[in-house]
Image (spheres, helix red, strand yellow):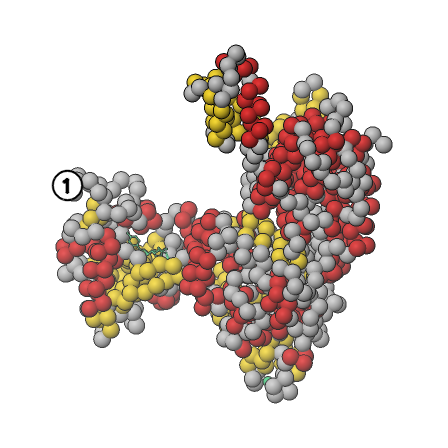
């Protein structure tokens, strides 16, 4: 054949690996372990190019580490609970379980066709009864350890999907999936007490040296530690409802108190509620506010609105001064005390608010170099550092010192027998609400009994299995209206009781799957020996979109599992790598409708519709997404070019953390190069020495040069893959292919060259093997080798071939420089002498004279005394 038929041969090699069970991780402690994991997919139906990129990278690492002698764990599973399965059930009448397992079957087949070196014997799906049974045990252990709580909180309620949404799932006040206006509801929910670990989760970020700084920063911001002051304002007699003698605020800027011009409270603050109960205008305002989502990001962009309650408070440090109290839409009840004092000159939100309601804007922090007489605030608050002014006893102090001075002053003062101010460290992180009012999730193993209250399901009654006979014909949670499943007898008193019908947030499922892979069939959540050996994950690879939630939840969960004795460590992921997205051009037809890339062709340099020939508008390059149709199906690429082409493309050119643009030209280029490697292997098999031939003793220059290039490439590719610089590894392989190709052009190669050609070809194949494993097997066989590349050790660079080992030496005759000589660094003295005398200018200079002495300073100089 004159072409490598990848799609056909890939199946063959996949079977060869499977037959030998090469990728099954061994639970033994003899070899050093290496655990490489890619974020497991949601079984949505088909794999997409983002998966191809992600899993290819992980597979390169897995194959590389295996070749380097590690016992590698590289598992795969399915994040299989979640809403889309239920939506499919609603839309198409197929049971969520069937929909999910069918998708898994399809996607498993697709992943297998990629030739990933996965240990399929450890496959898990989070919707497997076996898996969520263990998760229920973890829940109960956490409950016993005081890490679970039931709280009534204000939640975002999606009236279309009929479930609670996390703040992150509310976009512009609407449910991310349904697009419905989200309502605020008070509702009891189960929460995990992640806030118990706020400080620890923050501190430990510093130990995560092999995590991207960006991700660590995002997590730190999310945890959001603030040091500030709780400060009580006294309400003026008669201005406020009974029972509200003070309003307590949280501030990180007590230094700005002399610039305060109002106090503001959240719409659901107790004082606001009290006022609203007797004042219809206040009530109308509060209700309007409650229609908005509560996410902090949204609050930033909101038009700042307030309602003057008529309540007045005394300024804590300005004698006789009063401040108005507003209900304001930008104050969150869930943060601090749900109340603030506003200093418009130094806070942007406060400034916008003050401008809207005609409140004073008095600057109290003077920027360095500014003139106190002329300094003014325009449309932007000054939030930087500086020196206090307009501030009585704080005047002249730097911001830090002024914060302390004010805090000291207020801590020393008393209101009603308690200090007026108290220093407080505040976290933005909230407890993790895990209740979802949906069917397709892990049932929360609790029972509600009128007599006993909340009763955990006893261990012997686990698992709480999802009933299969459910209907989706009416909105809401099928578990809630199931005729039998819901009704139980109380394990504690034997009376009639009901099951908890909330299921767990699917982020719980993905918070410990990496631990489960260590002992996927154990009838306890984790096997101590297995997790002791395999954890932490050495290299975790996934999308940056999980930088906060999934990774933070997993870090918390690991701590919780540590506390409950299921693992012996706190940090699950030693190394983290976040890969970029796969992008593609977008296309629209004449009517502005999105088109798939396969519907677009180029004719006479113009983009047209493949079948109609109508003009097509080529739009921006964007992340592949179904909504814009700029997707390419991995199956069609694998079917046409083979998996290795897709893999090679994903690794080439673009650094792995950047977005990569999928182009037909790029794919063709990748494919051509792989064909070239295949041809080179064939030519090298003919020209090079036979497999296993030893290196001849004396190598000519060409042979030596090729050997050097080979070993330099081995060293460079090794280092690049170690650092996950896949694109530079690929570039090195390209270069070696070029060098080998030129070497193959030589007529009548010496024995040395023949050896060097074989060595180069074998190295090329072995170095490319983690990236294009099928092609590598094919070439390995063409080169006449036994066994599989997948079983070979990683090539070692010969360090003596890495240094340039020729030197250039000056040659003098009677102390006068006559020429120079390039010779092997370790050349013998006689060889250097002979080479020096053979130089033409030297020979001329000594012509007719007798050579009395030759002084050789090795690697430096030769002096001929004549
Ligand atoms: C007065 C002040 C003056 C403030 C100033 C800032 C600048 P971080 O750093 O994120 O912790 N704040 C407190 N509780 C709030 C709530 N529930 N909703 C909205 N805003 C709230 O932010 C702390 C600052 O955010 C606090 O400090 C408070 O405003 C505001 F020149 O107090 B500051
Ligand atoms: Zn009971």
Please state if 817 lies on the left or on the right of 449 as rendered. left
Please state if 458 lies on the left or on the right of 836 as rendered. right
Q: Is residue 368 visible?
A: yes
Taking the image in four quarters, ligand 2 sits in the one at: bottom right
Quadrant location of residue 730?
Answer: top right
Q: Is residue 177 above or below residue 833?
A: below
Q: Which residue is mark 1?
A: 373
Q: Is residue 265 visible?
A: no
Which is more toward the observer, 405 or 613?
405
Q: Position of residue 745 (x, y in %)?
A: 73, 24
Q: Position of residue 617 (x, y in %)?
A: 63, 27
Report if the beta carbon of the residue with label 1 is closer than 8 angstroms to ligand 1. no
Q: Position of residue 825 (x, y in %)?
A: 55, 32
Q: Is residue 635 above or below residue 272?
A: above
Which is more toward the observer, 694 or 288?
694
Quadrant location of residue 72?
Answer: bottom right
Q: Position of residue 111 (x, y in %)?
A: 73, 49
Please state if 742 lies on the left or on the right of 142 as rendered. right
Quadrant location of residue 692?
Answer: top right
Q: Residue at x 77, y 47 (%)?
A: 788
Q: Is residue 683 above or below residue 164?
A: above
Q: Is residue 796 above or below residue 424?
A: above
Q: Residue at x 81, y 36 (%)?
A: 5
Q: Residue at x 57, y 61 (%)?
A: 536
Which is more toward the observer, 539 or 438?
539
Question: Counting other residues with Cα less than 10 Å from the Cα at mark 1, is it few (<14), some (14-19), or many (20 or more)?
Answer: few
């Amino acid at each position: 054949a004159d072409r490598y038929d990848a799609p056909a041969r890939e199946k063959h090699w996949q079977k060869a690996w499977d037959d030998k069970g090469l990728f099954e991780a061994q639970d033994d402690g003899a070899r050093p372990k290496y655990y490489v994991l890619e974020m497991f997919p949601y079984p949505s139906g088909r794999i997409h190019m983002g998966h191809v990129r992600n899993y290819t990278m992980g597979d390169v690492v897995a194959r590389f580490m295996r070749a380097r002698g590690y016992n590698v764990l590289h598992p795969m599973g399915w994040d299989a609970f979640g809403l889309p399965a239920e939506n499919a059930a609603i839309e198409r009448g197929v049971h969520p379980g069937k929909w999910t397992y069918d998708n898994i079957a399809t996607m498993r087949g697709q992943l297998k066709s990629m030739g990933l070196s996965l240990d399929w014997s450890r496959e898990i799906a989070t919707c497997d009864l076996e898996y969520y049974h263990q998760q229920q045990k973890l829940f109960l252990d956490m409950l016993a350890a005081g890490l679970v709580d039931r709280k009534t909180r204000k939640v975002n309620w999606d009236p279309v999907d009929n479930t609670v949404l996390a703040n992150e799932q509310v976009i512009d006040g609407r449910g991310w999936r349904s697009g419905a206006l989200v309502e605020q509801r008070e509702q009891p929910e189960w929460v995990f007490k992640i806030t118990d670990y706020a400080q620890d989760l923050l501190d430990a970020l510093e130990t995560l040296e092999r995590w991207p700084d960006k991700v660590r920063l995002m997590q730190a911001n999310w945890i959001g530690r603030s040091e500030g002051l709780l400060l009580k304002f006294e309400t003026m007699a008669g201005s406020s409802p009974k029972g509200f003698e003070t309003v307590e605020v949280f501030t990180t800027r007590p230094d700005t108190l002399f610039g305060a011009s109002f106090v503001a409270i959240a719409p659901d603050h107790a004082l606001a509620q009290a006022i609203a109960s007797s004042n219809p205008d206040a009530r109308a305002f509060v209700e309007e506010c409650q229609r908005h989502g509560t996410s902090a990001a949204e609050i930033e962009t909101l038009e700042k609105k307030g309602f003057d309650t008529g309540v007045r408070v005394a300024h804590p440090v300005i004698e006789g001064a009063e401040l108005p109290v507003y209900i304001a839409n930008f104050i969150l009840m869930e943060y601090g005390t749900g109340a603030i004092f506003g200093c418009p000159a130094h806070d942007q939100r406060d400034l916008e608010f003050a401008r809207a309601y005609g409140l004073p804007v008095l600057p109290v922090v003077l920027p360095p170099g500014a003139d106190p007489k002329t300094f003014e605030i325009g449309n932007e608050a000054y939030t930087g550092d500086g020196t206090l002014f307009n501030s009585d006893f704080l005047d002249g102090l730097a911001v830090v010192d002024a914060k302390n001075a004010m805090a000291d002053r207020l801590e020393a003062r008393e209101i009603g027998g308690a200090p007026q101010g108290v220093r407080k460290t505040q976290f933005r992180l909230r407890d993790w609400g895990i209740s979802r009012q949906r069917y397709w999730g892990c049932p929360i193993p609790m029972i509600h009994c009128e007599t006993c209250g909340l009763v955990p399901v006893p261990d012997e009654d686990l698992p709480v299995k999802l009933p299969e006979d459910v209907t989706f014909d009416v909105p809401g949670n099928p578990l809630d209206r199931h005729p039998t499943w819901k009704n139980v007898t109380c394990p504690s008193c034997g009376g009639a009781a009901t099951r908890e019908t909330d299921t767990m947030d699917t982020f719980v499922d993905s918070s410990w799957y990496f631990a489960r892979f260590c002992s996927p069939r154990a009838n306890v959540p984790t096997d101590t020996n297995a997790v002791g050996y395999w954890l932490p994950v050495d290299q975790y690879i996934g999308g940056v979109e999980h930088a906060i939630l999934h990774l933070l939840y997993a870090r918390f969960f690991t701590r919780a599992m540590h506390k409950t004795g299921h693992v012996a460590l706190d940090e699950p992921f030693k190394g983290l790598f976040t890969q970029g997205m796969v992008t593609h051009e977008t296309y629209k037809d004449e009517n502005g409708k999105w088109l798939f890339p396969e519907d677009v062709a180029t004719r006479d340099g113009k983009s047209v519709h493949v079948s109609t020939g109508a003009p097509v508008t080529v739009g921006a390059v964007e992340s592949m997404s179904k909504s814009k149709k700029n997707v390419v199906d991995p199956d069609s690429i694998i079917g046409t070019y083979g998996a290795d082409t897709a893999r090679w493309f994903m690794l080439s050119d673009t650094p792995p953390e950047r977005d990569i643009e999928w182009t037909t030209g790029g794919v063709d280029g990748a494919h051509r190069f792989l064909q070239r490697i295949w041809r080179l292997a064939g030519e090298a098999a003919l020209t090079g020495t036979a497999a296993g031939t030893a290196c001849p003793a004396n190598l000519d220059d060409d042979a030596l040069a090729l050997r050097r290039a080979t070993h330099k490439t081995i060293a460079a590719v090794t280092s690049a893959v170690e650092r996950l610089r896949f694109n530079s590894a690929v570039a090195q392989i390209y270069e070696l292919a070029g060098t080998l190709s030129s070497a193959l052009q030589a007529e009548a190669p010496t024995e040395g060259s023949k050896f060097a050609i074989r060595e180069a070809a074998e190295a090329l194949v072995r170095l490319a093997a983690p990236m294009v494993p099928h092609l590598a097997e094919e070439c390995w066989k063409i080169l006449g080798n036994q066994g599989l590349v997948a079983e070979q050790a990683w090539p070692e660079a010969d360090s003596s071939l890495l240094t340039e080992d020729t030197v250039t030496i000056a040659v003098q005759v009677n102390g006068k420089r006559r020429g120079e000589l390039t010779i092997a660094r370790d050349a013998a003295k006689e060889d250097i002498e002979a080479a020096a005398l053979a130089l033409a200018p030297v020979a001329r200079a000594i012509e007719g004279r007798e050579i009395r002495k030759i002084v050789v300073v090795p690697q430096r100089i030769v002096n001929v005394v004549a």
